[in-house]
Structure formats: C-alpha cells, structure tokens
Amino acid sequence: MTVTDPKRRRYSTAVLVGLIAGAFSAIVKFGWEVPFPPRTPERNLVNPPQTMLEQIGIPESVSRATINFNGWDLPISSFIVHFGFAIFFGVLYCVVAEKYPKVKLWQGAAAGLFLWIFFHVLLMPALGTVPAPWDQPWEEHFSEALGHVIWMWSIEIVRRDIRNRMTGEPDPEVPLPVAAR
C-alpha cells in the first residue's frame, strides 16, 4: 500500500479540515434525503439513530426528544447522532488521507460505499437496529448507497480545497516542483 512522505503530512490541519468537512457533509446528507427519503414513513416513526440509542440504554425520553423549529418537531437526538457520525468519519477520512492516498479512491466515493455496506448492510441489521437487507425496500438501499457516495464525495471536495488552501501545497502524494522541495 502506497504511503506518503511523512514530512508532507499535515495531521493537525487534517483534523481541523475534517471537522469542517464533516459538519458540511452532514448537511449535504440531510439535503440528499429530502428528495430520496431512506425510510418509509412508518419505519421513520422511530428512526435508526433513535433505535440505536435505545439499544444502548438511552431512555425514550432522550432518544425521541424533539425541538420545535418553525412549527416542526425535529428529532434532536437523531440530529446529534447524524452530525456526530459525519464529523467523526470526516476527521478520520481526512487524517487517513494524509498517509494513505488510496482512501480517496473515486474522490471518496469508494469509502462512502464501504461505509454504507459496513453499517447499513452488515452491522445495523446484525444488531437488529434495522431489518435485514432483504427485508428493506430497494428505495432504502438506493437512498443510502448513493447518499453515502455523495456524503463522502462532499467530504473529499472540502478536504482537498481547504487543506490545500491552508497549507499552500497539494496533497502529500502529489510531487512538489523542484524549487519548492
């Protein structure tokens, strides 16, 4: 596996950029889910983040808590899980990309597909958080698979732009001009 030159890695920048990219990507994923809702209305009455919180012992009064904005009751605990997941993986992706450029395959789309398979097809069904993959509607797989691709792609776009602006350098695997070495 190809790794970058340790002198070219900027881990502290990667963490900061990952926080920004993760928050941005959470909003992108929310936007994706407006035209392509991942669950039926019945299955969304208690959504997977709420179910997961209850599986680890968080009471319903917390997991299903809402805040009201503009007449809409919004599931605040689900939003916290959603943003936490996006920010965690945004930081992880940006840090890993400093050393292992292959993580950026297809501008992050491959990482998005991997995370969709790992969480939505394997882990969450195994834990009983969501139904088995064959018991989920195809629309859910469509929304989640492509949503994860768009989500990770948005992290990569933000990562590359902000990292390169902050450091004034290209990514660590991109050769520098001889004068800059």
Image: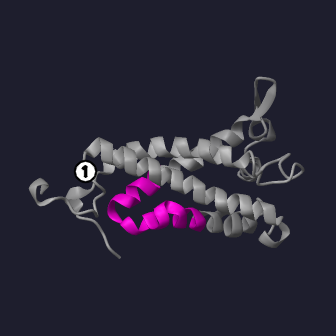
Q: Quadrant of the C terminus?
A: bottom left
Residue topped by disc 1: 169
| Residue at screen point 76% across, 54% down | 38
Foreground of the two, 9 or 147:
147
Image vertical order of residue 74 relative to residue 42, above or below:
above
Q: In this picture, which residue range is highlighted in magenta?
A: 91-114
Q: Position of residue 77 (x, y in %)?
A: 70, 39
**What's the residue type where badge 1 is placed?**
Glu
Q: Position of residue 52 (x, y in %)?
A: 72, 52
Dominant secondary-structure state across the stretch colored magenta: helix
What secondary structure is found at the residue carrying circle 1?
A: loop
Name the quadrant containing residue 139.
Answer: bottom right
Q: Residue furthest right?
A: 42
Is residue 103 one of those drawn in magenta?
Answer: yes
Q: Position of residue 177 (x, y in %)?
A: 16, 59
Q: Quadrant of the N terminus?
A: bottom left
